[in-house]
Amino acid sequence: MAEGLGRAAVGSTAGRDAGATVGLEELYRRHAPEARRLAYLVTGDHAAADDIAQDAFVKLAGRLVGLRSPEAARAYLRKIVVTTAVSRARSRQRENARVEAYARGDRPAPQDDTGTNGSSTDGPLWEALLRLPPRTRAAIVLRHWLDLSEQRTAELLGCGVGTVKSLVSRGLATLREEVGHV
C-alpha cells in the first residue's frame, strides 16, 4: 500500500470521535479477501479480481473521510467492486467485438492487446455462469453467494429492485436451460 494511504480514516471529519476512526490499512486487512472473492465471482478471472480489488481500495481511499463508519466502508467497497467488474467486463466485450470485426475484415485492429481471461472453470455451472452478461452474473452473485437482499443488491448495482428480480430470474432460467436444475 502506498505511503500515506493508510493514514486516511473513516469517521475523521470534524465533530466525530477520533477514537472511532479506522484506517485504510485496517479496512484493507479486514475486507481485501472478500473484495477479491466478490470480484472473482463476477469476473471468473483471478488476475482481474486482484486488479479490481486493488482499484476498489484506491477509489475507497479518496472517499474514506466522508464515510460514516467502517461498515459503511465495507458496503461502499462492495459497490465499487461490482461496478468496476461490470464496467471492465463491458469493456472486454467491446474489445472482443472489435477483434471479431477485425477478423471479418470490418475494422482496423485494436491498439492494445488486453487478451482474454485465462480463468479456469469448475464444471458446467461455472462455465454457464461465466457466459451470462456481467450485470446478470453480478446480480446472481450478490443475491445467492453473498445472500444480500434484493434492495441491497439493487443499491450495489445502481438499479431498481424490479431490475434485480428480472436479472436474477432471467439469469437462473438461462442457467437451468444450460445446466439443468439450479
Image: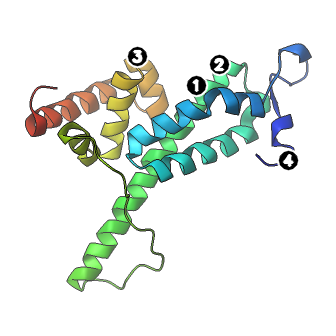
Q: CA distance from mark 2 to mark 1?
A: 6 Å
Is residue 14 placed above or below 39 in the rendered structure? Answer: above
Q: As shown in the figure, which amino acid type bears the numbered disc 2?
A: Glu
Secondary structure under the numbered disc 4 in the rendered image: loop
Q: Earlier in the sequence, mark 1 or mark 4?
A: 4
Q: Is residue 35 visible?
A: yes
* Circle nearer the N terminus (2, 4): 4
The numbered dot on residue 149 is 3
Q: Is residue 17 visible?
A: no
Residues marked 2 and 4 touching at CB (< 8 Å): no
- For marks 2 and 3, give the CA distance: 16 Å
Between 74 and 34, which is closer to the camera in this rendering? 34
How many C-alpha atoms fall within 10 Å of the one at disc 2: few (<14), some, or many (≥20)? Answer: few
According to the picture, the residue beneath numbered tag 4 turns out to be: 3
Q: Nearer the viewer, residue 179 or 71?
A: 179
Few, some or many residues within 10 Å of mark 1 (<14, 14–19, 20+): some
